[in-house]
Image: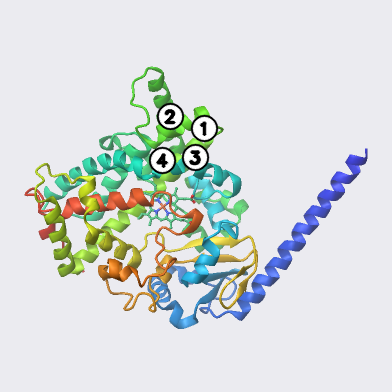
Amino acid sequence: MEKCIVTPISYIYFVIRRIFQSITRYIKCVALALRLPGPEGAPIVGFIPKLRDNKFLEDLGTNASNYFGPIFRIWILFMPFVFIYEPEDLKAVLAHGRTSEKSFFYRIMHTFIGDGLITSNGEKWKRNRKFIQPYFQNNFLQNYYEIFSRCSLKLVQNVNNRRQVKVTELINDCVLGILHEAILGVPSGETKNSPFRKGELLLLKRILKPWLLLDGVFKCSGMSKREKKQQSALHQYVKRLLDQRLDDRKDNQINWNTCLLDYFIDLMETTDFTQEDLLNECVTFMLAGQDSVGATIAFCLYYLARNQSIQEKLFQEIDIVTRSNNSGKIDMDQVMRMPYLEQCIKETLRLAPSVPVISRVLTKDVALANYVLPAGLNIFISPFMTHRLPHIFPNPVVFDPDRFSEEGLKNIPSYAFIPFSAGSRNCIGYKFAYLEIKNIIAMLLQSHPESKFRCNVGVRT
Ligand code: HEM
């Protein structure tokens, strides 16, 4: 009897406390935002119309520190968002997972990519990250490298069979083939009907039409139906592969642990990792490793095309290391001996990070050099902005791989180069990505008699 009375009272008390806490936090965030500089926004919708203006965004990303100093705010509807980009400030937020978590923008992505590593928070994220981390350590990279090598050889052949190529399409095809093999165990040549070829993230479209940020309104929209259809196609595809894999296992028809899906099946059989976790994580990894890698390779080729002397220097390095090869392939230890290649890739990721902005919500007050950011504040962290800070990267818009030479690295403080984010929620696939990108670019540029790509690099303006 006593319990029946106490429980609703404590529940009401809890709800009132939460509402009070949210209102206090909101007032503190608004009070801070009103003191901060920032770009002018439109009435009510604030910054949203500017998101359509690429020139404005590029200028803001390049000159933010000149315009506003180390920190600025924008408004989206009545919500303030604060951008931070100075390395010391980033360290305060990113170094310890205890001060922040993923913001509500990631919740919006749930309806498409599900509750995998990218979007999840708290204990669930911690458990799954711990499970999956070993699979992306050095000892597994050798297995992947064999897949990179085979797929990039096919890419080189495709490129050489044509006089002029739209290189982005061929690269995306190669990257997608690699992911299908490495994550799902599907041979790269059998991906023609894969739904992962057609995925479309609707997050930006929802932000541009802010009424769609309300879940209730979004659920009634055509966009939501399209997204549901996409999600169910991705999940059904992975589920079919899972069933097939389980059958093959019964019949002992496959090599164990040949792809991430196999590793997940092992986890499912030996831990509390569920089938739903498996589907969510497979979809997450398939989407996370696609455009991020494809765009970096395409941008790197673009910068090499625009900077012929740098391309020549890189070509010489690759030529010296691979001169004795006669298979057309490049070994893993050979790409490891190409420091200038790594510098070119890093400089590409500096100028054109394929994830230009990430977002967090603070779970505790965080003290920066000049401000205290209150708990509950939504923040944006932009690798694009940090990578263009002129006091760290002089002449920031110039493509100069020497910034990442042994000598140059001494001038780059920690948290100043963050294409893969940093801290406990950094990119789990970054070693995989570096190796894959190195292999593909080295394969394209090598001097093997079959490879004529170097001569063909050009920029259509
Ligand atoms: C050039 C290529 C890549 C770039 C620039 C990149 C960048 C990033 C960034 C910035 C994050 C943090 C996102 C955030 O905090 O919101 C991230 C997370 C993540 N990335 Fe990557 N990524 C790349 C390639 C890959 C690849 C190849 C994979 C897997 C095959 C991958 C899987 C993931 C996953 C699962 C996470 C979530 C990690 C976690 O929160 O525990 N990424 N990536």
Which residue sits at x=16%, y=46%?
158
- How far from the left and from the top, in percent, is residue 2? 93, 41
Q: Residues within 10 Å of mark 3 (few under 14, many from 20)?
A: some
Residue behind mark 1? 275
Judged from the image, the secondary structure of the residue bearing numbered disc 3 is helix
Q: Position of residue 78 (x, y in %)?
A: 63, 69
Q: CA distance from mark 1 to mark 4?
A: 18 Å
Query: Disc 4 versus disc 3: distance between alpha carbons?
Result: 8 Å
Give the spatial CA distance, label 4 vs label 2.
18 Å
Earlier residue among tags 2 and 3: 3
**Residues at circles 2 and 1 in contact by the CB criterion of under 8 Å:** yes
Q: Is mark 2 within 8 Å of ligand 1?
A: no
| Amino acid of disc 3 | Phe
Locate residue 212, reporting x and y percent.
56, 57
> In the visual, does 76 lie left or right of 171?
right
Side of 357 relative to 331 (left or right): right
Image quarter of the C terminus: bottom left
Residue where numbered disc 2 is placed:
242
Along the line of sight, the residue nearer the viewer: 317 or 8: 317
Q: Which mark is residue 131?
A: 3
Question: Circle 2: is it few (<14), some (14-19), or many (20+) Cα within 10 Å?
Answer: many
Q: CA distance from mark 2 to mark 1?
A: 9 Å
Q: Which comes before the other along the chain, label 2 or label 1? A: 2
**Disc 4 target residue:** 135
